[in-house]
Image: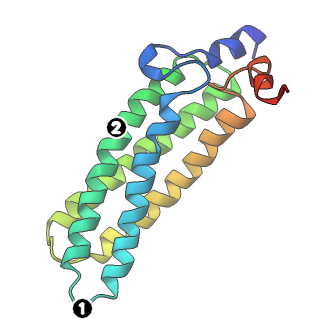
Amino acid sequence: MSSQEHLRSKQPASPLAGPYGHPFHAIAVTIPIGAWTASIVFDIIGLFSSDPSAYALGARVLIIIGIVGAIVAAALGLMDLTRLGKGTPARRTALTHAQLNVAGLVVWVVNFVVRQADPDRLPVLGVVLSTVALAALGVSGWLGGKLAYRYGVRVADETTQLEGFRR
């Protein structure tokens, strides 16, 4: 990757992507991650409950919140993807990150549909789908961390970072 491509990867594609050094994608992903993680907590509690209907409803609501949040996060992530040079390791990593996220999103949508069939219960298939999707998104999150912390995508350059260490 050329120095010019590296500098380009740090700049927002649009004001909608967030200001320099503070991308909105990284903030937006906390919504689906938190909602989907909480839905699994509801699943676990519901599995041990004599009446799982409230937990089943809570899990479905959290899954929908996660789906909507993931769509917003994906739009923001695509803006950051456009800043990466073709053929670079950073772009290949970002494409794998995006593919895993899309696959995970599809699994969460299927999961929601499965749960709608019997809304007062926690289907075992739904719990399995949640676990598989969250595992895939964990790998994707690791790749997202690699993009930011190893390749410095949408992270302020070191000169800007030094401002936080001057006395």
The answer to whether residue 85 is visible is: no
Q: Position of residue 84 (x, y in %)?
A: 60, 19
Q: Quadrant of the C terminus?
A: top right
On screen, residue 58 versus residue 8, left or right, reads: left
Q: Position of residue 150 (x, y in %)?
A: 74, 35
- Which residue lies under the disc numbered 1? 50
Q: Secondary structure at mark 2?
A: helix
Q: Which mark is residue 66?
A: none
Report which residue position mark 2 lands on.
71
Image coordinates for residue 36, horizontal then vertical, percent:
39, 58
Q: Could you tell me if residue 49 is visible in this image?
A: yes
Mark 2 vs mark 1: give the one in front. 1
Rendering quarter of residue 96: top right
Q: Is 141 left, or right, of 54 in this rendering?
A: right
Query: In the rendered image, which quarter is residue 60 located in?
Result: bottom left
Q: Amino acid at mark 1?
A: Ser
